[in-house]
Image (spheres, rainbow, N blue to C red):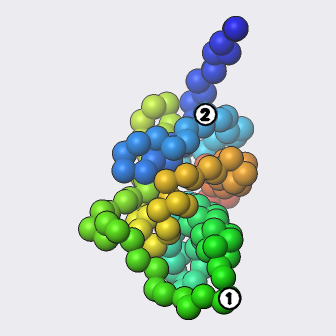
Amino acid sequence: MKTKKIEEQAYEFIFYINNHIICQRYFDIRDFNKSRLEAHNMKDLLDTITGMNNGNYGELGIIPNFLKEKTCDYLWGYYNPYEEQSTYETKNNNKIDNFQFEIKVNKVSVGKSIFSGNPFPPKVRYSVDIKEIIPSIISEIRNYLSEKNYKNVGV
């Protein structure tokens, strides 16, 4: 069996839960605008991807929205209208699970965001498979880091 060597590219994102890698992807960015890394609003990009509120109540980032959809699917899958519904409880309420999302350029971290995984059921947060949203994440990063008409307004 031949193993395929993955060519490392200059840009990557890593998605973790409790410092354990869930997903890591390398990609390229055409027309990279280095000044975007120095901008004070790199937070906007991270909020778009991982924001739990994103400035507007109820508006989620790409990853939390995906996890919310998986949570709804999971909960509806076990819903029985003939049984009394109880509140959602876990056996270990003290366990804190955090998701981390990191963007790196040339192996140097340029942005990192952390959000709580506790709003999502354990079955959802421990079996995360973000394959279907990877193109959206990479597209968002590419668009942000290649924008040419950006004016850095100092804070």
What residue type is disc 2 on? Tyr
Which circle, 2 or 1, is nearer the viewer? 1
Please tell me which residue is depicted at 50% across the width and 69% down the height of the picture: 120
Please tell me which residue is depicted at 55% across the width and 61% down the height of the picture: 124
Q: Which residue, given by chain and number where applicable, does mark 1 sit on?
A: 81
Comes first in the chain, label 2 or label 1: 2
Q: Quadrant of the N terminus?
A: top right
Q: Is residue 96 above or below residue 112?
A: below
Q: Is residue 151 above or below residue 127?
A: below
Residue 49 in the image, given as x and y percentages of width and height: 57, 61
Q: Which is more toward the observer, 61 or 145? A: 61
Q: Quadrant of residue 72?
A: bottom right
Label for residue 116? Answer: none
Q: Is residue 54 above or below residue 107?
A: below
Q: Is residue 42 left or right of residue 136?
A: left
Residue 87 in the image, given as x and y percentages of width and height: 46, 86
Residue 5 in the image, given as x and y percentages of width and height: 63, 15
Q: Quadrant of the C terminus?
A: bottom left
**Label 1 environment density (alpha carbons within 10 Å; few <14, some 14–19, many ≥20):** few
Please tell me whether mark 2 sits on a helix, a strand or a loop. strand
Residue 38 visible, this angle: no
Please tell me which residue is depicted at 39% across the width and 71% down the height of the picture: 90
Q: Which residue, given by chain and number where applicable, does mark 2 sit on?
A: 26
C-alpha span from label 2 to label 1: 45 Å
Residue 10 in the image, given as x and y percentages of width and height: 57, 30
What residue type is disc 1 on? Pro
Outermost residue toward the front in this view: 82
Q: Is residue 83 left or right of residue 111?
A: right
Q: Is residue 52 above or below residue 3?
A: below
Outermost residue toward the left in this view: 94
**Label 2 environment density (alpha carbons within 10 Å; few <14, some 14–19, many ≥20):** some
Residue 11 visible, this angle: yes
